[in-house]
Amino acid sequence: MSGTLVVAGLGPGDEALVTPEVATALADATDVVGYIPYVARIPARDGLTLHATDNRVELARATHALDLAAAGRRVVVVSSGDPGVFAMASAVFEAVEQAPRLAHVDIRILPGITAMLAAAARAGAPLGHDFCAINLSDNLKPWETVARRLRLAAQADFAMAFYNPRSASRPHQLARALEILREECGPDRLIIFARAVTTPEERLSVTTLAEARAEMADMRTVVLVGNASTRRVGRHVYTPRRAE
Amino acid sequence: MSGTLVVAGLGPGDEALVTPEVATALADATDVVGYIPYVARIPARDGLTLHATDNRVELARATHALDLAAAGRRVVVVSSGDPGVFAMASAVFEAVEQAPRLAHVDIRILPGITAMLAAAARAGAPLGHDFCAINLSDNLKPWETVARRLRLAAQADFAMAFYNPRSASRPHQLARALEILREECGPDRLIIFARAVTTPEERLSVTTLAEARAEMADMRTVVLVGNASTRRVGRHVYTPRRAE
């Protein structure tokens, strides 16, 4: 009597960016599990139980969802963006690894529009050439690892997207990241602060590395950094497909 | 009498991965412009003109689409995946830069599910920690640039996604990329060959760097490379959220 576990990406916020695949999974679910603001996006209906939990308990949330599925429920774990990009999919597999009793649960991951790609689309095409995505949080890795990675990424001339650039408990990461970029890149390097893209609170600002300040980001911001060729055309920012 | 230009991502192939935002734009279009197999996905209807062109003419296609929009049409340029990831969005901005007469056209980019994230979801969560996306084609950049970037990305311990790993006109890139990875990473490094994900021709195979062969990829394949911590759990591959 094993159920199913689906880990679904809700995209950046606008319901028009939820894929039909995810909408179908949600319509079929008996249980939806996730962080409070993401579960709040799911309308209540008969036969559906909503399980909203705090953000700092990913592993416990994943285990709870797997136990529900093992008991025969059709469970959807909701993430914002894409579940495979700094979101719940890895936590679910970590939970399986730690609890062999859950190894038989049927798990499917459904992709979604991740924040950096929604932000890039709003700005133009700043990730139009080789790029990387870095989680600036040092909750789960030492800052030295982040710093080294940033420096190598700049030397490789990747465009970059920073997730979790700044929060109340981690106010200094982005300032340190900008310092590293200033050592490796020129002052005219374009930086985009994209907050809450596709929601009513959306705010997009384009600046240069010389003018960028950590205070321009908060926990709802994704920061995009151009490569050496990234430039403005009209109100847009784009990275050419060619490279030297 | 200016129209609009939308650059829309159709996702990896399955219609259930086309966002409602993109579906709405297509329903409202007077003209759809794109590479032949992507335009073939759009059903014909009265009032809609389909413009299908060959793949090697991105800039000419973009200029054509912009000229249609400048003449008052509602034009959608279709890309597979996400238009901002190695697709048509950058080509459109290049075309605007080269033709100032088109600077007034209203351009919007609509994100889609890009191949690496669809492939990652099928495999589990191999991009669950910091990662990069690299276009292995050297059509538009020297191979030395690709090689240097690959080496730095491996040293930074990024998980990686390779787009355009191999084609008839570029048969050697992936073999050279694997050689570089073998110099920088251990033989057990996990490699995923994901072909035509979400289509009837989907084929996914997981192997190690020691066993990986360039012939496992073709032009419809995206190649995912784990980081040093990426591992299997059951039939899935995932990258933990923690790093040393």
Image (cartoon, coloured by chain):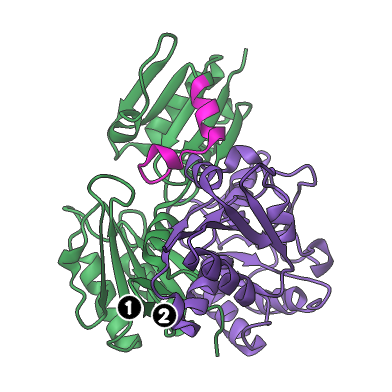
Chain colours: A purple, B green
**Residue B190 circle label:** 1
Give the x, y percent position of residue B19. 52, 38
Is B17 within the magenta?
Answer: yes
- Packing grade of label 2 (10 A; few <14, some 14-19, many >=20) is many
- Packing grade of label 1 (10 A; few <14, some 14-19, many >=20) is many
Residue nearest the viewer, comparing A225 with B12: B12
* Observer able to see residue A69: yes
Give the x, y percent position of residue A225. 63, 62
Residue range highlighted in magenta: B11-27
Residue nearest the viewer, comparing B92 with A72: A72
Which residue is under mark 2? B230
Residue nearest the viewer, comparing B123 with A31: A31
Residue at 60 percent across and 48 percent down: it is A118
Q: Amino acid at mark 1?
A: Leu
Q: Is A87 situated above or below B203? A: below
Q: Amino acid at mark 2?
A: Thr
N-terminal of the two: label 2 or label 1?
1
